[in-house]
Structures are given as C-alpha cells and as structure tokens.
Image (tube, helix red, strand yellow):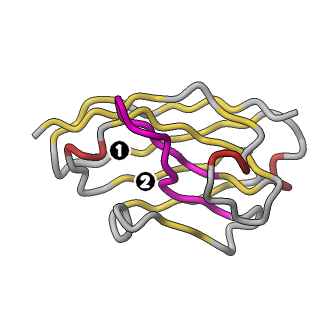
C-alpha cells in the first residue's frame, strides 16, 4: 500500500510560481508511475502531468505544457510539480496519485490518492 501526502499549495498572483510536493510512504514507491491531477469546483478531475516510474517518460496536459514540470526523486519517495506562469484558470485542488500502469493519464488507472492541496491563483 502507498500513502501520499501533498504539500506546497497556497495563494499566488497570476504569473507567479509554486512547487507542489507529494511524499509517499512505502518501499515500493519507485515501482509506481505518478500523476498530478486537479479538480476545480463544478468540474471533473483532470490530468495535469504524469511520470513513469523512472522519470524517463513524461506526460503533460496541453493547458500546462511549457509552464509546469513534473519530476520525481525515488531516493526521497517524492514527486514534484513545479508550476510557473500561473493563471487564474489553474485554480483547483491538486492531487497526486500512484498507478501500476506505465504512464496513465486517466483517474481510474490510479490506485492511490493523496488528500489534495489547494492552489488559488488571483488575477
């Protein structure tokens, strides 16, 4: 079993940056692909970025390409999401999740979820 805890959310002005972290418990973290999702009020949960277990394969939603970077440190059991040039439409609760698939991009492919961290971007 994997337990995930996100941190790093907060309130930032448009154009600013935040770095989210997701700390995982368990010795099997390095065997899981990891993803970042977000969910805004009244909207479905959507993929933001994902990384394979090694970090060698990455996926980004079109809406964040060139602005967000996902990375992982398997020695620290942590995955990161660096968010730059933030926009008001990036406002959402951000979740990290773990999947046994190589590089999953849909929520139902992920087995374990964190509790989420709020990101609010003011205009």
Quickly name the residue at label 2: 82
Q: Residues within 10 Å of mark 2 (few under 14, many from 20)?
A: some
Q: Is residue 98 left or right of residue 89?
A: right
Dividing the picture into quadrants, the one containing residue 102 is: bottom right
In the rendered image, is residue 76 in sight? no
Q: Decide: is 116 above or below 66.
A: above
Dividing the picture into quadrants, the one containing residue 91 is: top left
Residue at (49, 66) in percent of width and height: 60
Front in this rendered view, residue 81 or 37:
37
Front in this rendered view, residue 120 or 109:
109
| Magenta stretch prevailing secondary structure | strand
Front in this rendered view, residue 113 or 66:
113
What's drawn in magenta, residue-wise? 35-51
Q: Is residue 88 left or right of residue 109?
A: left
Q: Which residue ends up furthest to the bottom in the rendered image?
A: 56
Quadrant in which the C terminus is drawn: top left
Q: Position of residue 81 (x, y in %)?
A: 49, 51
Quadrant in which the N terminus is drawn: top right
Dividing the picture into quadrants, the one containing residue 41 is: top left
Q: Decide: is 7 above or below 36.
A: above
Q: Is residue 39 left or right of residue 88?
A: right
Q: Which residue ends up furthest to the top in the rendered image?
A: 115
Which is nearer the N-term, disc 2 or disc 1? Answer: 1
């Amino acid at each position: 079993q994997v337990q995930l805890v996100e941190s790093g959310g907060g309130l930032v002005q448009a154009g600013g940056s935040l770095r989210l972290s997701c700390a995982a418990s368990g010795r099997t973290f390095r065997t899981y692909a990891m993803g970042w999702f977000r969910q805004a009020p009244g909207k479905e949960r959507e993929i933001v970025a994902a990384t394979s277990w090694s970090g060698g394969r990455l996926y980004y939603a079109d809406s964040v390409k060139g602005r967000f970077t996902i990375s992982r440190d398997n020695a620290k059991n942590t995955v990161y999401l660096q968010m730059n040039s933030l926009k008001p439409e990036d406002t959402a609760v951000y979740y990290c999740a773990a999947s046994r698939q190589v590089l999953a991009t849909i929520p139902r492919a992920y087995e374990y979820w964190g509790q989420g961290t709020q990101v609010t971007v003011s205009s």
